[in-house]
Amino acid sequence: MIRQTQGAGFKLAATAIIWGFATGMLGICIPLVSMTDSGVILPLAVIIGASFTTTVVWLSFNRVSRNTVELSNNVESLKEQEATLETIDNNEKEKFDDQNRIKLLEPRDNS
C-alpha cells in the first residue's frame, strides 16, 4: 500500500511538471500564433505532446511497480531456498561427523 502511494506521488509530481511546462509553452504560443499565422497547429502540438507524455508516465510507473513486487517475491523465495539448503547442509555435516566418530571408536586389528 505504501509503494502505491509513493508511486502516485511521483506520478502526480511528474504530471504537474509536464503540464506546468505545457502551460508555459501555450503562453509562448499566443504571440507566435499571431506573428506566424500558423493557427492552432502549435498549441495543438503542445497539448498532444503533454498528453502523450503524461500517459507514458502513468503507464510506465504501473509497470515498474508490478516489476518491483515480482522482484521482492523472488527475493523472498530465494531467501527461503537458502535457509532450506543451509539446514540440509548442517544435517549432512552432522551425519558425516557422527560416521567419523563411529569409525574412530571401532576397534582396529593390529595384526
Image (cartoon, rainbow, N blue to C red):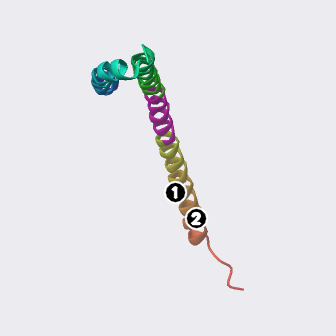
Q: Which residues are magenta?
A: 64-78
x 65%, y 77%: residue: 108
Q: Quadrant of the N terminus?
A: top left
Residue 3, numbered circle: none
Going from the N terminus, do you reach mark 1 or mark 2 first? 1
Q: Is residue 81 above or below residue 20?
A: below
- Disc 1 to disc 2, C-alpha distance: 12 Å
Q: Quadrant of residue 54?
A: top left
Residue 9: horizontal and vertical position, in percent?
28, 24
Three-letter code, disc 2: Ile
Q: Is residue 72 left or right of residue 5?
A: right
**Label 1 crowd (10 A; few <14 / some 14-19 / many >=20):** few
> Residue under circle 2?
102
Q: Is residue 70 above or below residue 44?
A: below
x 30%, y 18%: residue: 30
Q: Is residue 64 left or right of residue 89?
A: left
70 or 31, nearer to the observer? 31
Residue 6: horizontal and vertical position, in percent?
30, 26
91 or 40, nearer to the observer? 40
Residue 94, numbered circle: 1
Three-letter code, disc 1: Glu
Q: Is residue 103 left or right of residue 51?
A: right
Q: Residue furthest bottom?
A: 111
x 39%, y 17%: residue: 43
